[in-house]
Image (spheres, rainbow, N blue to C red):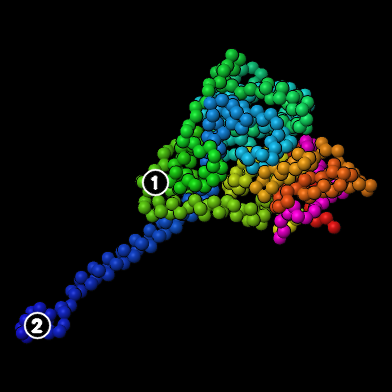
Amino acid sequence: MAAMCALTLGACGKQAETPPDRVAMEAKAKAEAEAKAVDAAAKEAEARAIAIESYVYAYPLVTMEMTRRVMTNVAEPEANRAPMGQFIRKRTYPDASYRDFTAPNADTLYTTTWIDVSKEPYILSIPDMKGRYALFPMLDGWTNVFQVPGKRTTGTKAQTYAITGPGWSGELPAGVTEYKSPTGLVWILGRIYSTGTAQDYKEVHALQDKISVVPLSAYGKPYTPPAGTVDPTIDMKTAVRDQVNALDANAFFKLFAELLKTNPPSADDAPMLAKLAKIGVVPGQDFDAATLDPAVAKGLAGAPKPAQDAIMDWMKAGIVAGDLKLENGWLFTTKTGLYGTSYVQRALITAIGLGANRPQDAVYPTSEGPDVAAKYSGEKKYVMRFEKGQLPPVNGFWSLTMYDADYFFVDNPLNRYTLSQRNKLKVNPDGSVDLYIQNESPGKDKESNWLPAPKGPFVLMMRLYWPKEQAPSILDGSWKVPPVKEAS
């Protein structure tokens, strides 16, 4: 028995000791496993940080493409959609039943089209506007307004432009001005001012019908645009922003990489491209998450939600940074249309105001309450007072629009959704002008200055088109939107 103990256990009641080299090997293996886990965690964290920043950078281009798909997924032009290369010609202002897009306006009639200039240029022809205010901003795939012909910049006479894509060179017809787009994707977002009367609508419609866009190869020839191809897989009901936010990281960056092939980054984006390469996104190449290091792929997968939060958080952080301003309860920015490397500012404007103009063309102060601690409610009565000589200083026009809490027009007995300079506003004896913002009529003698509100929460938005650049001006801060106060 004692011999058996000695042979099997080394001593009765004791197990044989592990050889020293085996202990060392196990310790080494454990250390290596821990080091790999630490390395993987570091790779995942770095990839997630880069992916969040890259998502913010890519968000406008992806959103533009998703918007284009929805707006052009029809066989023939309709009220709010038209095939690629064909115009949507809005004939009237929307009413309170309209629910297609948030924050509609009742000042300009849209005349808009999407074109692809990656293969050949398109020729845009604008008729003589006869002095009428209009502008035709051209947005590239990144939402930058690269050109904006219109009354402010080029006057109102008849004009013809060739919109050429990146890398294109060739001969253009005589009398045609070249506008080179930095990207293959272009959105022409034309706006023509109208007073909204039947006669004025008729005049604007005649102008809209003379606006045309054709491929260079068809210019000067009889041309019938081809019917659009309808893709049944495109979601035509869900809001575009919700569709973009629902994309997982793989789908988002795969689409982004595909779009980069015809919508190149700018030279100033070089530092961003170096970061993109670390997560497998390289301009001109397909993106395949399956080829990534598993830790990097895991980091990417966790990026969309925090990136979306970072974009919307800029509503507050942007005020601190100076890209957004909050004055007298009005939130606005004069940094739109051209963004440079301000990627989060560009992403926020994409999320809440896709298609924004350059500030020289329009500024949109928005207010959800008289101050940050209070929201507007139709249960109360409000007054907005412009002191003598302090109405909005603009060369184009100004308006104050009423929206419900979801940014849609409010049904009311006057069918009035805005107050503007075209209204015959009553002036006080001292020269000031009071606007009455409330649910019930302020009285017949004041109804000319009444902006009807819903019974519940509401939002106010001003539109200052072609704001004056000399003081007083909202552009340099020498003019401020007056506060909206509860009526005493």
**Amino acid carrying mark 1 in the image:** Ala
- In-image side of 116 versus 107 (left or right): left
- Locate the N terminus and report the quarter of the image it occupies: bottom left
Gap between marks 1 and 2 measured at Cα: 59 Å
Q: Which residue is mark 1?
A: 289
**Magenta stretch: dominant SS?**
loop
| As drawn, 476 above or below 44 | above
Q: Is residue 394 magenta?
A: yes
Q: Secondary structure at mark 2?
A: helix
- Locate the C terminus and report the quarter of the image it occupies: bottom right
Tell me if I can see residue 360 in this picture. no
Q: Which residues are magenta?
A: 373-397
Residue drawn at (18%, 78%) of the image: 17
- In-image side of 41 versus 223 (left or right): left
Residue drawn at (69%, 29%) of the image: 91
Q: Is residue 219 magenta?
A: no
Residue drawn at (71%, 44%) of the image: 410
Q: Which residue is mark 2?
A: 5
Query: Residue 15: horizontal and vertical position, in percent?
Result: 16, 79
